[in-house]
Amino acid sequence: MVGVKDFEGRGIVKGVASGPALVSRTPFSFLGDVDIRTGDVIGELSDLRGQNIAGRVLVVPATRGSAGAWRFLYQLKQHGTHPVAIITGELPDPSVVQGAILSGVPIVSGLADRIGNAITDDTILRVDGQTGLIAVVDDQQP
């Protein structure tokens, strides 16, 4: 059963992870928006520029990708600078899905806008990529 602080989307990549949210209103590209060595967002088109995705639940409306995006997500994992989970509004780019599978990063799709409008950055989320259930673990809103 889905609780008041829970959201149900479409599980894309299996796995369960928890972490503080990082909410974006712009599509995200692993190929050009992030420094794989640090996890810092460097892309000029991203509203997350200057923030860090390492250990965060990345909430984005969409992913922008290319055939090589999977390598960047995999390298983020190798450097320990990867997001712990990804929540998207639209179905993620297939290359991002491939990278998430290789990196063990769960993905849930179909509700980034709903979550992004209901929480703030740093709200702790638990993401289940198999069931598509996202739970607000620590609601820091007033």
Image (tube, rainbow, N blue to C red):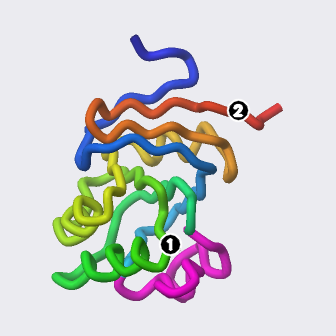
Say what amino acid the circle numbered 1 marks: Gly
Q: x, y (%) of residue 69?
A: 27, 79
The answer to whether marks 1 and 2 mark residues whose Cβ atoms lie closer than 8 Å is no
Residue 106: x percent and y percent?
34, 50
Queried whether the magenta region covers residue 22, the answer comes back as no
The residue mark sitting in front, 1 or 2, is: 1
Task: Tell me the residue at 57%/24% (across/down).
Answer: 5
What secondary structure is the stretch in magenta mostly built from?
A: loop
Amino acid under label 2? Asp
Q: Dot 2, crowdedness within 10 Å: few (<14), some or many (≥20)?
A: some
Q: Residue at the location (29% across, 53% down)? A: 90
Count the marks: how many? 2
Residue on which the image places disc 2? 139
Residue 8 lies left or right of residue 13; in this view the side is right
Residue nearest the observer in this picture, 73 or 21: 73
Place of residue 85 in the rendered image (x, y in percent of width and height, measured from the top left):
43, 53
Which of the two labelled residues, at mark 1 and mark 2, occupies the earlier sequence position?
Answer: 1
Inspect the magenta stretch and tell me whether residue 39 lies in it.
yes
In front: 26, or 59?
59
Quadrant where the N terminus sits is: top left
The boundaries of the magenta stretch are 31-53
The residue sitting at 45% across, 29% down in the picture is: 7
**Residue 46 vertical placement versus 89 (above, below):** below
User: In the image, which disc is placed on residue 114?
Assistant: none
Which numbered marker is on residue 80?
Answer: 1
Secondary structure of the residue carrying numbered label 1 = loop
Residue at 67%, 81% in the rendered image: 50
Q: CA distance from mark 1 to mark 2?
A: 26 Å
